[in-house]
Amino acid sequence: QVQLVESGGGLVQSGGSLRLSCSVSGLPLGAYVMSWYRQAPGKERERVGTIGVIPGTNYAESVKGRFTISRDDSKNIVYLQMNNLQPADTANYYCKAVYNSESYWGRGTQVTVSS
């Protein structure tokens, strides 16, 4: 059974940092393109960034220079390091695994940034 479990969310002050983790089981993580998404109340889910199988990354303009995605395939974990957090970053954050036509989502972890 495939499971993606996000953790590391919480409440942080503006300018602070958090590191989210996405623990993956039931699939060979090294074969999957991994992405982080977020969804704020009343808004559509948006892609934060993606890390490829050969780790190259790309990010949404809104987080470029502040967020960094990394992966440790030996531990089946993908990370999202978030620095200089702002209230606009408040959302539920999800990880997604994609391989060809297969895709899997986690349930999300809440990040709240206070001003």
Image (tube, rainbow, N blue to C red):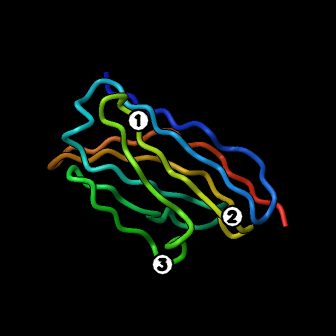
The residue positioned 35% from the left and 67% from the top of the image is 58
Front-most of 10 and 102? 10
In this view, the residue farthest toward the bottom is 61
Percent position (x, y) of residue 38? 53, 58
Q: Which residue is mark 2?
A: 85
Front-most of 15 and 50? 15
Percent position (x, y) of residue 16? 74, 58
Q: Earlier in the sequence, mark 3 or mark 1?
A: 3
Q: Which residue is mark 1?
A: 77
Quadrant in the rendering for residue 73: top left
In this view, the residue farthest toward the right is 115
| Amino acid tagged 3 | Glu
The residue positioned 44% from the left and 46% from the top of the image is 95
| Amino acid tagged 2 | Leu
Quadrant in the rendering for residue 114: bottom right
**Within 10 angstroms of label 3, few (less than 14), some, or many (20 or more) residues?**
few
Instruction: Determine the secondary structure under disc 1.
Output: strand
Q: Mark 3 and mark 2 in contact? Answer it, CB < 8 Å.
A: no
Instruction: Determine the secondary structure under disc 3.
Output: loop
The residue positioned 27% from the left and 35% from the top of the image is 29
Q: Which residue is mark 3?
A: 61
| Real-space Cα separation, disc 3 to disc 2, in angstroms | 14 Å
